[in-house]
Image: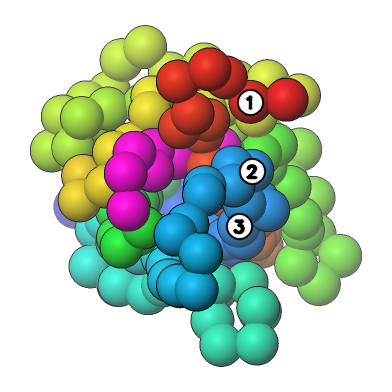
Amino acid sequence: MGIPRHLRAAALVAAAMLMGLLTVQGSYALWAVAASATPGTATAASFDVSLTGTPTGQVTNMTLPGGQAAIISLNPSTALTPGNAVYSSVSAINNSDAGGQFNISVTAGAPVVSNVAGGALATYVTVAARTAATAGTCGTTNYLAIPAGGLTSVAVPKGTSATLCFEVRLASNAPATVKGQSVTITIPLTATQLCGVPSGCA
């Protein structure tokens, strides 16, 4: 039995989407809090955040040596078809060894959906996001468009993590003319130190 023509087109669109679905770029905000030290002593601390992508399982530090932003791929393992969505996530672990309280938050900025090789597929792709305790609890509900100011996680204490979940949806009216085309989706991530001084920060 043959595959109906409209289903063949949908399968081709799905395959194209998987070529370069999600790229997350990370960077740190500047340290915001100063702490006093005993005269004659100085201690260095690291602002270290590691990223784990799901479902790829890729792990990287958020910022590479020299301050270059890391890139982590989140390509979903399931096919995307018109009217449906696929899901990925990134977990950020606060690995700082700074003394005292050193909470951070992680913000996903507005996604940039770009056509590859002059295609038109980006017109039919939308990206939404939400936060979750772990990648396993992302689910498929409560996703909203990422606001202009970004989606920010809850406070992440040292040694713990926060997860940002992403939904990529292909419009149900995606035409057969976009078959074989692909897009790249770039989502910037920023880790920011939260105020750890009881009296507050200026």
- Residue 32 numbered tag: 2
Q: Distance between the residues labelled 2 and 3?
A: 11 Å
Q: How crowded is mark 1: few (under 14 residues within 10 Å), some or many (20 or more)?
A: few
- Residue 201 numbered tag: 1
- Residue 33 appears in which quarter of the rendering? top right
Can the viewer see residue 167 in this picture? no
Q: Earlier in the sequence, mark 2 or mark 1?
A: 2
The residue sitting at 27% across, 47% down in the picture is 158
Out of 44 and 74, give the one closest to the viewer: 44
- Residue 103 numbered tag: none
Percent of width and height locating residue 54: 27, 56
Q: What residue type is labelled 1?
A: Cys
Task: Say which element carries label 3.
Answer: strand
Q: Does the magenta stretch include residue 83?
A: no
The outermost residue toward the bottom is 65
Q: Comparing marks 3 and 1, which lies closer to the viewer?
A: 1
Q: Is residue 38 above or below residue 198?
A: below
Q: Which amino acid does label 2 sit on?
A: Ala
Q: What colouring method underlies this structural image?
A: rainbow
Magenta residues, start to end: 99-107
Q: Is residue 74 left or right of residue 59?
A: right
Q: Is residue 67 above or below residue 28?
A: below
Residue identified by numbered label 3 = 28
Q: In which quarter of the image is the C terminus?
A: top right
Q: What residue type is labelled 3?
A: Tyr
